[in-house]
Image: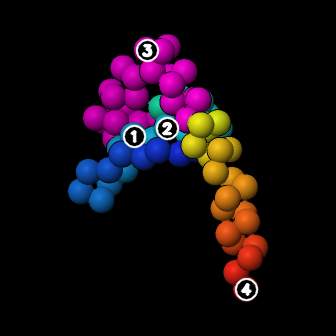
Amino acid sequence: EYIRSWYFNKLEFTRFSSSVGKFVGFTELGVKNAANWNKDASKLSVWRAQKETYCQHNIQNWYTNMLTKS
């Protein structure tokens, strides 16, 4: 799962989660940002692709690195 969160003063106000597939707001500002960002289909497709380009590309490297250290 790919998660990207935005914080201000240690308070999470917006999050993108690949399992949800859209932005979610947690504060008044975050809800407004999420609503605007979710309207843009091209922005959503870029963020949804981050799971494949970042996570799945590196997963074998992470597992190999973790399993070889004991």
Residue type (three-letter) at the residue carrying disc 4: Ser
**Callout 3: SS:** loop
Q: Is 60 situated above or below 25? A: below
Looking at marks 3 and 1 on the same chain, the residue that comes earlier in the sequence is marked by 1
Vertical side of 34 occupied by 9: above or below = below
Q: Nearer the viewer, residue 10 or 69?
A: 69
What amino acid is at disc 1? Answer: Thr
Question: Label 3 near label 4: C-beta < 8 Å?
Answer: no
Residue drawn 41% across the image and 36% down it: 25
Secondary structure, mark 1, is strand
Q: Mark 1 touching mark 2, by CB under 8 A?
A: yes
Residue in the picture at 55% in, 35% down: 50
Q: Is residue 12 left or right of residue 43?
A: left
Main SS of residues in magenta = helix
Q: CA distance from mark 1 to mark 2?
A: 7 Å
Image position, residue 27 (x, y; %)? 34, 41
Identify residue for label 1.
14
Which of the two marks, 1 or 4, is nearer to us in this view? 4
Quote the CA–CA distance across marks 3 and 2: 14 Å
Q: Indicate which disc, 1 or 4, sits on the residue closer to the N terminus.
A: 1
Whichever of labels 3 and 2 marks the residue nearer the N terminus, that label is 2
Kindly identify which numbered label has been placed on residue 40.
3
Residue 40 seen in this snapshot: yes
Asked which quadrant contains residue 51, the reply is: top right
User: Is residue 40 toward the left or the right of residue 69 in the image?
Assistant: left
Reading the image, the residue beneath label 2 is 16
Q: Which residue is mark 4?
A: 70
Give the extent of the magenta segment: 24-50
Identify the residue at horizontal 53%, vertical 45% (top origin).
3
Q: Is residue 46 magenta?
A: yes
